[in-house]
Image (cartoon, rainbow, N blue to C red):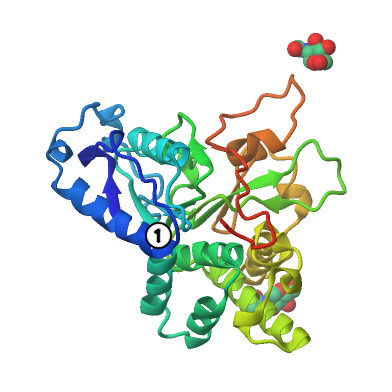
Amino acid sequence: MTIRSRHLKFSALTYHAHGVSRPSIFILTCLFFILYYHPMRLAPERAPYEPFREQLRLASPRIPEKIWYKVGPKGLSDQSHEWLHDCLHKNPAHSAQIMTDLTGDEYVQENFGYRPDIVDAYLSLTVPILKADFLRYLLLFTEGGIWADLDVSCGDVPIREWIPETMRAKAGLVVGWEFDVGWGQNIIRQFESWTIMAAPGSPHLMMVIDDIMDAIDQKTEEFQVSVSELTLDMAGDVIDFTGPRRLTRGILKSLELALNETVDMESISNLLEPVLVGDVLILPGYSFAASSNAYGNETEIGPSLVQHHYAGSWKNHNGGEI
Ligand SMILES: *[C@@H]1O[C@H](CO)[C@@H](O)[C@H](O)[C@H]1NC(C)=O
Ligand SMILES: *[C@@H]1O[C@H](CO)[C@@H](O)[C@H](O)[C@H]1NC(C)=O
């Protein structure tokens, strides 16, 4: 389902889908047709957000202007719906694609035919958060764009201005520190994974994907289970298994291979400005994770590009919405 903010008014509609995934897919499908044929589609109530911005240069010539979201069985909450709508309103050239459990499965089947191991593993996994983590890397690797968790809202800086102008031609992957400043020197730094921007075909994301495949192999071997029997307990820490630390390690490892040199952590830590390492743009903590970094009050920092509201709907024994 693709939504373009300019053609839509969905504030009058709610996405409340109850029960399991099939009804919610049915409702989303209906909603799509209602919206598609809705007379308001051609007559948005609010004018697009500063329309002149559409003439600005793209944030990156390589990163598609598409925002990926993924809903669980309960569909989109009113709050997420509001954030999504606001984000599209502020970024009129961007479209949103809302994936469901079903369309995620279909997407992976259709696009990873050349990697049956990935299709098998993805379809077999049952723990929702592991699939949701995995899916973002697969979507961004295939098509690129921007992944956004449903508990993320956009700040006022248009996405087209997220990448410093001098870095636009080079940036093929954009990540932001989750924990960088204010935690002392001995922390394990990680990139957040609620917002990731990528050009299609990033080798760094393929490294993350391959590392997840290896981790799945290891765990199924260790516990002598099939992928479908893999539980959250067996997987261990989600952050390490498929989450932000997996992302961070994979990207840095891949970068080191590509550059044939070690990435000096000093040079990418305690950032007050974005840095480009190879084709990876690393944004300071304040960009995507302002609330989890602490700067001295005399330190000049840049704008917060997105806010993460830490819904953490996966933090339960089920590893996903119940
Ligand atoms: C990588 O770096 C090492 C040492 O700096 C060098 O000997 C080697 O030739 C390099 N490999 C490639 C493929 O450039
Ligand atoms: C910075 O914060 C400290 C402690 O909260 C305060 O005493 C100080 O006045 C602040 N300085 C400025 C310039 O705001």
Q: Quadrant of residue 9?
A: top left
**Image location (x, y in percent) of residue 68:** 42, 54
**Residue at the spot of label 1:** 99
Residue 62, visible in the rendered structure: no
Q: Is residue 93 visible?
A: yes
Q: Is residue 153 above or below residue 22?
A: above
Please state the horizontal and vertical placement of residue 212, each as a whole percent of the image: 63, 74
Q: Amino acid at mark 1?
A: Met
Q: Say left or right for 34 vs 50.
A: left
- Name the residue nearer the viewer: 172 or 104: 104
Left or right: residue 6 compared with residue 59: left
Left or right of 237 in this view: 141: left
Secondary-structure class at tag 1: strand
Check disc 1: other Cα within 10 Å, few if <14, some if 14-19, many if 20+. Answer: some
Up the image or down, 308 lies above or below 211; here it is above
Q: Quadrant of ligand 2?
A: top right
**Residue 318 versus residue 272: which sits nearer the camera?**
318
Question: Which residue: 36% across, 78% down?
Answer: 110
Tell me where residue 225 appears, x and y as whole percent: 69, 87
